Image (cartoon, rainbow, N blue to C red):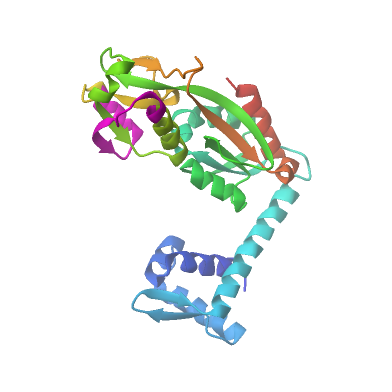
Amino acid sequence: MDEKDWLILITLYEERNITKTAQRLFISQPALSYRLKQLEKEFKTNLISRGKRGVEFTVEGEYLVQYSKNMRKQLGAAKEHISNLDKKVKGTLRLGVSGLFARYKLPVLLKEFLTLYPDVEISLKTGWSSQIHQMLQKEEAHLGIVRGPYKWQENKVLFQEEKICIASSKKIELKELPFLPRVNYQTDQSLRNTIENWWQETFAVPPKISMEVDRIETCKELVLNGLGYAILPEICIKDDEPLYTFPIVLSDNSFLLRETWVFYRDVTMDLAQVKAFIDFLNDSKQ
């Protein structure tokens, strides 16, 4: 059993389908089936069973999947450790980043970082902040950039704070909002909660939501075309866009803010590429 077998078992466990697994790994189905039979022969037991709903793993098969995950993690850690022995900033930097931050801020940051450290390779995954938080807990990333008040027991750095704003194609006033059409968009639960809590504290009636869209960019385009107002974090509002915006002010005269955090573990600071990226982010903070 070797590294290729580990990947086969892990991918098959995720897909539960021989055809999809072969496609993901760029190997033929006969070659995949042959390798599975060889593994079953090596361990003298059935690892999977095929049914109408796809592939099911036996108890022995599930044990080998977990073994494979552990071995891949240990091999990755060994490679990272060896690549850092000469103290040169190189190796793979595994990042998990909030999708919105990745859309509006990350490309420029990564370009500048790789200009400074061209020997570093980037492995990037984006998603909701809740998904990035889970990735970090599973140690699937060296470092995570999340938006919102997520709990983290190890190292964290506040990278930036931004205002949450009312955005419209024309001038409107706060008191008008309950009577105007609002465009809503899918977002992380923490931002949704922040906006809903503010609304309930400010108004006695629910918002008049006329449109629901899946992306904040789609929401903004609808607003730009005069089809309603939206409540947007400042990160996605560009200076040259013809939007009328004003920040939400709380009862204590402070702004309603959205925080962006950098989370990482103590042990990852032993890796030169992680330390370099954290130092770079600290220097880049607004």
Q: Look at the image and tell me in which quarter the C terminus lies.
A: top right
Apparent side of residue 139 relative to residue 240 in the rendered image (left or right): right
Q: Residue at x 58, y 67 (%)?
A: 6
Q: Nearer the viewer, residue 146 or 192?
A: 192
Q: Nearer the viewer, residue 281 or 80?
A: 281
Q: Is residue 180 visible?
A: no
Q: Residue furthest front?
A: 204
Q: Look at the image and tell me in which quarter the N terminus lies.
A: bottom right
- Above or below, comparing residue 262 to residue 43 in the picture: above
Apparent side of residue 214 relative to residue 121 in the rendered image (left or right): left
Image coordinates of residue 242 in percent, x first then y, are: 30, 15
Magenta segment boundaries in residue numbering:
199-223
Q: Nearer the viewer, residue 151 or 10?
A: 151
Image coordinates of residue 258 in percent, x first then y, are: 50, 28
Q: Is residue 88 visible?
A: yes
Apparent side of residue 276 relative to residue 222 in the rendered image (left or right): right
- Above or below, comparing residue 146 to residue 29 in the picture: above
Image coordinates of residue 283 in percent, x first then y, are: 65, 23
Q: Residue at x 72, y 47 (%)?
A: 83
